[in-house]
Image: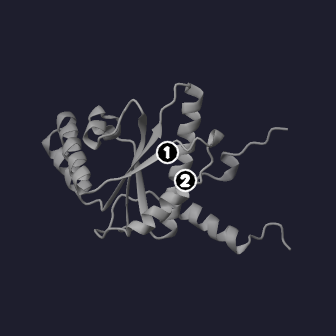
Amino acid sequence: MNETALSPRAATTLEVLRGRRTVHDFLPERVDGALVERAIEAARWAPNHHRTEPWRFYLLGDLARSQLIARNTQLVKDEKGERAAEVKRARWEAVPGWLLMTCLRSEDPFREREDYAACCCAAQNMMLALWAEGVGCKWTTGGITRDPELFHLLGLHAAREFVVGLFWYGRPVEVLEQQRRPLSQVLSRIE
């Protein structure tokens, strides 16, 4: 057997890994909740230091979404003006699925860093699981995710957790092609 030949399972895995893209524009239809829960289930299997499982997921319903949209519209208006705020509001209102991921805080800075890294792995697991089902995702860490008002609006506790990201998901309008640097530009061998 040729050493470079991939098993069908490996080929499928690599196809999903290489194919996943950040999606900016979604079809208006909502994604089945069971599919999203399967993706969150996949996220839970990310590696995590000492099995801390520091991630928390919040599926945002219509009320939570409208509150975040209103707050973000105000933030954008204050920074960039009315026109930019209205453009952003319309764009956000078109997103069919919303999920917030947080990470539990720790008094130990090393553990908090390890836990954040684990949450990033969980986020990738989730996005790959969604992608394998034809659902695109955008992970944002924009201003609203750092706004102290976010915790108040959603009834969360900033002393207990911090935001890893806000994830928008849905069926993509289009999938853009993407290139990566050649392996030779990112891989070095140290002997």
Quarter the C terminus occupies: top right
Left or right of 35 in this view: 114: right
Left or right of 134 in this view: 29: left
In the figure, 58 relative to 105: above or below? below
Quarter the N terminus occupies: bottom right
At numbered mark 1, what does the secondary structure look like: helix, strand or loop?
Answer: strand
* Amino acid type at image mark 1: Trp
Residue at 63 percent across and 64 percent down: it is 14
* Amino acid type at image mark 2: Arg
Residue at 44 percent across and 68 percent down: it is 35
- Count how many numbered circles sit on residues in the image: 2
Inspect this view and state whether residue 177 appears: no
At numbered mark 2, what does the secondary structure look like: helix, strand or loop?
Answer: loop
Q: Are marks 1 and 2 in contact (CB under 8 Å)?
A: yes
Q: Nearer the viewer, residue 177 or 12?
A: 12
Residue 180, horizontal then vertical, whole percent: 57, 54
Q: Quadrant of residue 150?
A: top left
In the figure, 6 relative to 180: above or below? below
Left or right of 54 in this view: 24: left
Residue 44: assigned label: 2
Mark 2, Cα crowd under 10 Å, few <14 / some 14-19 / many 20+, is many
Residue 171: assigned label: none
Mark 1, Cα crowd under 10 Å, few <14 / some 14-19 / many 20+, is many
Work out which residue is located at the far left of the displayed protein and give it: 82
Q: Nearer the viewer, residue 145 or 41?
A: 41
Residue 127, horizontal then vertical, whole percent: 49, 58
Q: Quadrant of residue 165?
A: top left
Q: Which residue is mark 1?
A: 55
Residue 176, horizontal then vertical, whole percent: 44, 63
Inspect this view and state whether residue 63 appears: yes
Left or right of 33 in this view: 152: left
Tell me the distance, in whole angstroms, between the alpha carbons under discs 1 and 2: 8 Å
